[in-house]
């Protein structure tokens, strides 16, 4: 238990360092995008390569990809239902900001540090389905609802397959399923790069952390609170009802408490929606995720 708390506190220190250094001006707005590019194109894919290389994937686990898609549809549907009496903009906002999980740059470092390669591979499969929706699928539906563009399979596929982490999940799943073993030199290089992933992810979370309420406190708390309650229900169903080993069910429970997708505020801004509320809800979901995931890890130590 002490080791779990120590590691969790180190993550908090990394986040706090990002917040502090941005506040004193050493880092400025936009620097988080540079870190994001490094994480999404180098350190996270390298961590995925190592995880899948050391974990034997069973074909039955492909169901976790569908589970990631299903969870996004469920949360999007909840957001739409809660805004059903509002305008098109309200419904599109609900679709975008209730759904999606920030797994790659937030939950993966926890899994990488506490649950090892097996946890990384399981989380990666769930995030494959999650990425299908939160990097393009949900935005396409919200965009069509706003009258911006019709959902198009080619455009959605282009958005999804331009994501390096998604491509990494997919390729390594197929490689692992085939039984092919990557050369040791590749695994060594990827291991060295992946060692920086946890720090960069947590530091970037700190750089991105902003809560600007300005009169929308009630709406922000409503989004974060209702989403959290839904995730509690989902996590309970995952743990007690899914026909997987307990290790897999525990990983899925942790993934279900991930913060709101980092793409939600971006897509909200692109559609001319309330980006202030979207950004505040996204940031507020982070400390809640930290407390919940840390509590679960301590419980299961």
Image: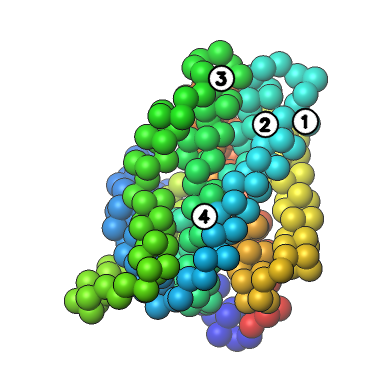
Give residue 190's position: percent from left, percent from top. 27, 69
Query: Which secondary structure, mark 4?
Result: helix
Give residue 29's position: percent from left, percent from top. 37, 40
Q: Is residue 285 left or right of residue 151?
A: right
**Pointers 4 and 2 in contact (C-beta within 8 Å):** no
Q: Is residue 245 left or right of residue 10?
A: right
Mark 2 against mark 3, which lies toward the viewer? 3
Q: Earlier in the sequence, mark 1 or mark 2?
A: 1
Vertical arrangement, residue 28 with respect to residue 66, above or below? above
Residue under label 4, please give it. 127
Q: Earlier in the sequence, mark 4 or mark 1?
A: 1
Query: Which secondary structure, mark 3?
Result: helix
Residue under label 1, please give it. 81
Q: Is residue 261 left or right of residue 228?
A: left
Q: Residue 144, which numbered label?
A: 3
**Pointers 1 and 2 in contact (C-beta within 8 Å):** yes
Q: Residue 94, which numbered label?
A: 2
Q: Which of these two is toward me, 5 or 128?
A: 128
Q: Which of these two is toward me, 203 or 128?
A: 128
Residue lying at 22% horizontally and 72% vertically, measured from the top left: 186
Task: State the CA–CA distance, disc 1 to disc 2.
Answer: 8 Å
Task: State the CA–CA distance, disc 4 to disc 2.
Answer: 21 Å
Residue at the outermost bottom position: 2
Task: State the CA–CA distance, disc 4 to disc 1.
Answer: 24 Å
Q: Quadrant of residue 53?
A: bottom left
Q: Earlier in the sequence, mark 4 or mark 3?
A: 4
């Amino acid at each position: 238990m002490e080791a779990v708390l120590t590691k969790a506190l180190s993550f908090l220190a990394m986040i706090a360092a990002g917040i502090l250094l941005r506040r004193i001006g050493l880092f400025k707005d936009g620097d988080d995008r540079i870190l994001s590019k490094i994480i999404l194109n180098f350190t996270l894919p390298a961590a995925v390569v190592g995880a899948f290389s050391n974990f034997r994937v069973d074909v039955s686990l492909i169901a976790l990809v569908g589970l990631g898609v299903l969870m996004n549809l469920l949360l999007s549907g909840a957001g739409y239902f809660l805004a059903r009496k509002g305008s098109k903009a309200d419904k599109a906002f609900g679709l975008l900001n209730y759904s999606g999980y920030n797994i790659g740059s937030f939950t993966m470092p926890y899994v990488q540090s506490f649950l090892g390669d097996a946890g990384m591979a399981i989380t990666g499969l769930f995030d494959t389905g999650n990425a299908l929706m939160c990097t393009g699928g949900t935005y396409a539906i919200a965009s069509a609802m706003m009258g911006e563009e019709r959902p198009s399979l080619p455009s959605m596929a282009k958005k999804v397959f331009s994501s390096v982490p998604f491509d990494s999940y997919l390729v390594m799943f197929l490689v692992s399923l085939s039984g092919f073993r990557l050369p040791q030199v590749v695994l060594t290089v990827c291991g060295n790069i992946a060692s920086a992933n946890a720090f960069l992810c947590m530091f970037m979370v700190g750089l991105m952390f902003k809560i600007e309420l300005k009169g929308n406190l009630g709406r922000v708390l409503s989004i974060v609170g209702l989403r959290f309650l839904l995730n509690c229900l989902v996590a309970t169903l995952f743990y007690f009802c899914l026909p997987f080993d307990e290790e897999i069910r525990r990983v899925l429970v942790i993934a279900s408490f991930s913060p709101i997708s980092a793409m939600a505020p971006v897509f909200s801004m692109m559609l001319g929606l309330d980006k202030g509320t979207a950004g505040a809800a996204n940031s507020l979901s982070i400390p809640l995720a930290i407390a919940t995931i840390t509590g679960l890890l301590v419980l299961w130590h």
